[in-house]
Image (cartoon, rainbow, N blue to C red):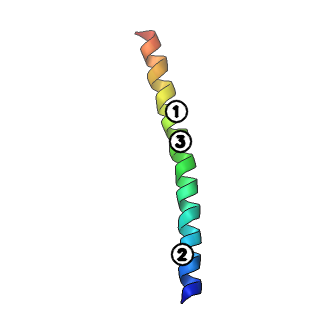
């Protein structure tokens, strides 16, 4: 039982790290679009 919990925690941490990296990239792309559009105005 404790082994399963440990595996779950490890997978959860891995997912959070991957999700965090993707979110950072996504936010940067959106920010770049906003800044490039604001320069045109």
Residue located beneath label 1 in the image: 29
Q: 3 or 31: which is nearer to us? A: 3
The residue that appears at 55% across and 61% down in the rendered structure is 15
Where is residue 6, by image quadrant?
Answer: bottom right
Q: 33 or 12: which is nearer to us? A: 12
Considering only order in the chain, which callout, 1 or 3, is on the residue closer to the N terminus? Answer: 3
Residue furthest left as drawn: 41
Residue furthest bottom as drawn: 1
Residue located beneath label 2 in the image: 8
Residue located beneath label 3 in the image: 24
Considering only order in the chain, which callout, 2 or 1, is on the residue closer to the N terminus? Answer: 2
Secondary structure of the residue carrying numbered label 3: helix
Residue 28: where, in percent of width, then height? 52, 33
Residue 18: where, in percent of width, then height? 58, 55
Relative to 18, residue 38 above or below: above
Whether residue 30 sits left or right of residue 21 in the image: it is: left
Considering only order in the chain, which callout, 3 or 2, is on the residue closer to the N terminus? Answer: 2
Residue 20: where, in percent of width, then height? 53, 50
Q: 10 or 40: which is nearer to us? A: 10
Give the position of the C terminus as an image quadrant.
top left
């Amino acid at each position: 039982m404790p082994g399963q919990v440990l595996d779950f925690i490890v997978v959860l941490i891995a997912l959070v790290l991957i999700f965090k990296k993707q979110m950072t990239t996504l936010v940067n792309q959106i920010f770049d679009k906003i800044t490039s559009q604001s320069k045109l105005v």
